[in-house]
Amino acid sequence: MANGESEPGADVPVGGFVQLLTPDGERIDSVTTADGVTYSVDFTDEEYRGLYRDLVTVRRLDAEATALQRQGELGIWASLLGQEAAQVGSGRAMRPQDMAFPTYREHGVLYTRGIDPIMPFGLFRGVDQGGWDPNKFKFNTYTIVIGAQTLHATGYAMGITMDGKTGSADGEAVIAYFGDGASSQGDVNEAFVWAGVFHAPIVFFCQNNQYAISEPLEKQTRIPLFRRAAGYGFPGVRIDGNDVLASFAVTRAALDQARNGQGPTLIEAYTYRMGAHTSSDDPSRYRIASEVESWKARDPISRLKAFLTKQQLADDTFFGQVDDDARQLALDLRERVLAMPDPQPVAMFDNVYPHGSPEVDAEREQFAAYHASFEGSAH
Amino acid sequence: MAETVTLGKALNHGLRRALENDPKVVIMGEDVGKLGGVFRITDGLQKDFGEDRVIDTPLAESGIIGTAIGLAIRGYRPVCEIQFDGFVFPAFDQIVAQVAKMYFRSLGNVRLPIVIRIPYGGGIGAVEHHSESPEALFAHIPGLKVVTCANPVDAYFMIQQAIASDDPIVFFEPKRRYWEKGPVELDADLAGAYPLHASRVVKEGADATVLAYGPMVRVAVDAATAAAEDGRDLEVIDLRSLSPLDMGPVYQSVRKTGRCVVVHEAPGNLGLGAEVAARVSEECFYSLEAPVLRVTGYDTPYPAARIEEDYLPDLDRVLDAVDRSFGW
């Protein structure tokens, strides 16, 4: 291969991508892109097994969430099925001081940040709007408006520069998640402009899962998404989004560049949304089964399992243990989701303004008085 | 010692003081740096505070507000300038869906102390999109606070109060009053300033209450002066805070006068005047001698400059409404 990147073929898109682990579980030592950048990973056996454990765990937790939704315990669920490698690889590539700005599907990234996986379930169960402290977890609140968070991430990255926290190996960087659909949004393009102009320490991580609900990629773009970066003045790299090693290697390098003061990078993780957009969606209306089947052959977990097996880095005992542990975590998650209390109705008046509002306070009082008026009545 | 300054210069002084007092305050917008803003409100600030504190941004309003949100999450206190009222709409999503809701969404964990400055209103002979009054669109959004100043003193203190507040605030500046002068105590302590979210009686009177804000306060006061010649004693209240509204002084006034006229440049349909009228009707029903009357811009797009004086409420239209109130 002329440039070291995978050539287009049945499984490789035009323009190629960085792949360090083939769907068959073959390890590629290193890849040098057309831009002359070489990517590789140097994991210990334990780290390889750790990545496998991550992938299996986030898939299992996701399956539990889908089941909870089907059983009426969640209002909706946005499944990450198929995108585990993109999320785990990029999530593990972050250093502790880095900040993530997710969409509403980055449960895998959240998990790799060491955050209790129950955290976003308030949003999906409908007991809150997804409230947590972004600065505590270095993980912003889920953002539902498509692409809006890329600007927040860029502003945060500008703040890192203004704080003088770039230019060294222990500098800070930001990763902004979004999807192929979001790439059409004005906000995403404005974020690219800003990041380029201000040389912000940010990595734009686009999980191109081929669909924006029902609309396939060709409704969003005429060129490979990673190539758009050139127009904004920073590098764009495409990776095999189902290869956790490529996801890690390229994201780690891009984040380190950013923290060192070398500006933004766009990463396009070429992957596939194996499930529906959300539990409210019916993908059988807009895509054919054979397409889904072809992506099953590129599954992120089975290729790592094949690699671990061939290299004798893990055996059935290990794989069985990982499955058991993941199931246990999932059952624990289920129990705790079911135990989540509904909020008190009057809580809707909380947290509208940091300094409060006499108007909201008055409505809270009216609301409380109205409900109190029924106390002691037969109804 | 009081110094006589224009409303625009008072804002400039207020911004300067905010930049001096808190290193986390940053100003961002189109042309706010070297140029000092198209109205020169940020004149000289970049020179004195640097390009990191007074940031010339790319020309994209959603980007201005969106990146301000990220800066605020990082601990900064961004003051965003939207160049003209009619250009705020590309940022509407970020303001409504993100700025207004982040504190609520995050269960109180994230404060976005962002001030969004918007020069608004007509009367300057401008082309389309440069003379609008979109304040009701923002006052309608829970999570946002909305204020507007009408004189140099309020301009100077209210902008500082807004920046010091942790609430996200849309700060409307009456652009046609930028050049009107008044004495301002530039050394006065902010703590002693009139509260940000309070309305204020600017002229006492016994016969009818006229409510106004921003550029219309001057019109209302002029109308009161003219009415006095006819023996009518109008009370004029500057609402100042459009969300939340401070209605206490309004109710007190209407209970005294029994008549209420509310004035704004924005179209009347679903404008601030409608909300004010509803609340006055609920609270002062037995005191009212006439319905609350509105004097507003018409329910048309803002017209061409050569006829804008016919669109904008003026002294005569206010007096006409007062007459109608008395004739009820």
Image: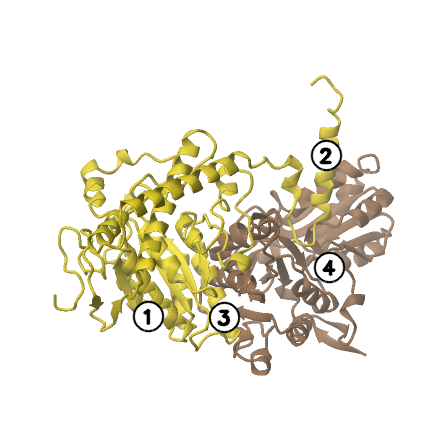
Chain colours: A yellow, B brown
Residue B196 image label: 4
Type of the residue with mark 1: Phe
Q: Residue A220: x, y in percent? A: 29, 51
Residues tagged by mark 2 and mark 4 found on one chain of the structure: no
**Quarter of the image holding residue B324?**
top right
* Chain of the residue that carries numbered disc 3 in the rendered image: A
Residue at left offset 61%, top offset 72%? B41
- Where residue A243 sits, quadrant-wise, is bottom left
Q: Nearer the viewer, mark 2 or mark 4?
A: 2
Residue for badge 1: A234
Amino acid type indicated by mark 4: Leu
The reply to whether the C-beta atoms of the residues labelled 2 and 3 are less than 8 Å apart is no
Amino acid under disc 3? Ile
Question: Can you say whether B267 is above or below A371 in the image?
Answer: below
Residue placed at 43% from the left, 72% from the top? A198
Helix, strand or loop for disc 3? helix
Mark identifier at residue A160: 3
Which quarter of the figure is the C terminus of chain B placed in? top right
Which numbered marker is on residue A276?
none
